[in-house]
Amino acid sequence: MKVEMKDLEFGYDPNVPVLKGISYILDKPEFVCIMGPNGVGKSTMIHCMNKILKPTSGFVYINDKEVREYKLKELAGHMGYVPNASEDSFPLSVVDTVMVGLQNDHKFGTSDDDLQKVYEVLRLMKIQHLAMRDFNELSAGQHQKVMLARGLVRSPEIVLLDEPTSNLDVRHQLEVTKVLSELPEKKGMLVIMISHDINITAKYADKIIMLHGGGIYAVGTPSEVLTKENIRTVYGVDADVIDVGGRPHVILNDSIEEGSEEI
């Protein structure tokens, strides 16, 4: 798998770019987290990757093919997408809701292989006990786990996730992020996730892309990116960074810089 951004720029207002000069290549199975303050362009970046948004200028390539050349069905064969805290309503069981993620594979009916894929991903997300429950009767956190299962059921090469743990409590945030972090090794996937939780990201990410001022400010391992200086510049807060088991752990202080970006 390969995702390449080349001189990517996007702006909702042509005179005010949200993203500018984004150039980067991701070309191997790994767990990549995109971080930065609200409004910095994290969701915009992944929406340019999956054809929800058309770049103002520059290019996005998926497996060396420009994303605008893909038909949506073809792109779905390479890429899964899970939006942030979906408000979707499905008058279906959990099994049938996840099965929707396979709708491009068969025109009529479902096969035993389909059901096997669905139950495999339900077990992965530890929600197999919800299989026959009505999707609309579930809690917000259970909804989000089902939507994650639907995005993963095709075992795509590339998975884009927009704050997928935002409706989950701390225990389930850890549980789900750990599962996602294991997908590159277990399934050979490139997993790209937007995250606001600094310490959960630090604990599990292989790589962090930190955005600031419309561009990529820092890229690297959690230890390389989550430094006191970077956190102060990007988030406008002071923090202490300590080592816990070879991973950084960020302790935020009360000091907030005047005129800093909204967090």
Image (cartoon, rainbow, N blue to C red):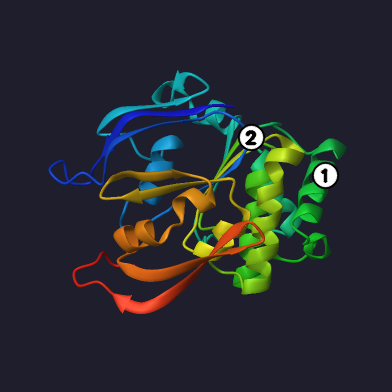
The structure residue drawn at horizontal position 25% and vertical position 34%, both measured from the top left corner, is: 56
> Relative to the observer, which residue lies in front, 29 or 71?
29
Percent across and percent down for residue 24 are 41, 32
Please tell me the numbered disc located at residue 115: 1
The structure residue drawn at horizontal position 43% and vertical position 74%, both measured from the top left corner, is: 252
Q: CA distance from mark 1 to mark 2?
A: 26 Å
Label 2 Cα neighbours within 10 Å, binned few <14 / some 14-19 / many ≥20: many
Check if mark 1's residue and mark 2's residue have beta carbons within 8 Å.
no
Percent across and percent down for residue 157 are 63, 32
> Relative to the observer, which residue lies in front, 71 or 190?
190
Name the side, left or right, on which 44 lies relative to 117. Answer: left
Quarter residue 142 falls in: bottom right
> Relative to the observer, which residue lies in front, 20 or 95?
20
Name the side, left or right, on which 225 lies relative to 247. Answer: left
Instruction: Say which residue label 2 marks.
Output: 29
Label 1 Cα neighbours within 10 Å, binned few <14 / some 14-19 / many ≥20: some
- Total marks in image: 2
> Relative to the observer, which residue lies in front, 175 or 62?
175
